[in-house]
Image: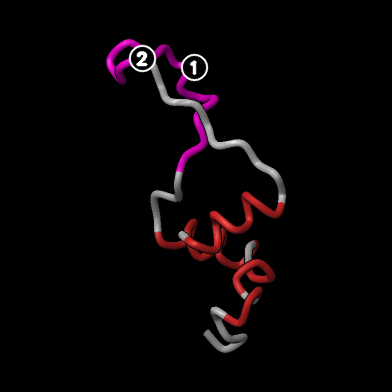
Amino acid sequence: MMMAGMDGIENKLTPASRWTKTSTIWDRKSLAKIPSMPCALDQALDALERDHEFLLRGDVFTEDL
């Protein structure tokens, strides 16, 4: 989480605003715009592979890990 925060600072990202709707009144078009997390192990591993360079910054993770 600290790495994600530092990445946001370095890239001058603005945190997302709070949601004002409850999940029961979102329509499909609005829901499709919300980024989601991987829901399966293979998707999570693919995401980690795509972010491999990010994970090596700051000597937090090693190449082997």
- Camera-side residue: 52 or 4? 4
Q: Mark 1: which secondary structure?
A: helix
Q: Residue at x 49, y 26 (%)?
A: 17
- The answer to which of marks 1 and 2 sits earlier in the sequence is 2
Q: Are marks 1 and 2 in contact (CB under 8 Å)?
A: yes
- Camera-side residue: 31 or 6? 6
Q: How busy is the neighbourhood of tag 2: few (under 14 within 10 Å), some, or many (20 plus)?
A: few
58 up-or-down from 25: above or below: below
Task: Name the residue type under label 1.
Answer: Ser
Segment colored magenta? 21-36
Q: Mark 2: which secondary structure?
A: loop
Residue at the disc numbered 2? 21
Q: Residue at x 61, y 82 (%)?
A: 59
40 up-or-down from 29: above or below: below
19 up-or-down from 63: above or below: above
Residue 53 picture location, percent across and down: 69, 70
Residue 38 picture location, percent across and down: 45, 50
Give yes or no for residue 23 being in the magenta stretch.
yes
Residue 22: quadrant of the picture = top left
Task: Name the residue type under label 2.
Answer: Lys
Residue 4 picture location, percent across and down: 55, 57
Give yes or no for residue 42 being in the magenta stretch.
no
Q: How busy is the neighbourhood of tag 1: few (under 14 within 10 Å), some, or many (20 plus)?
A: few
Residue at the disc numbered 1? 30
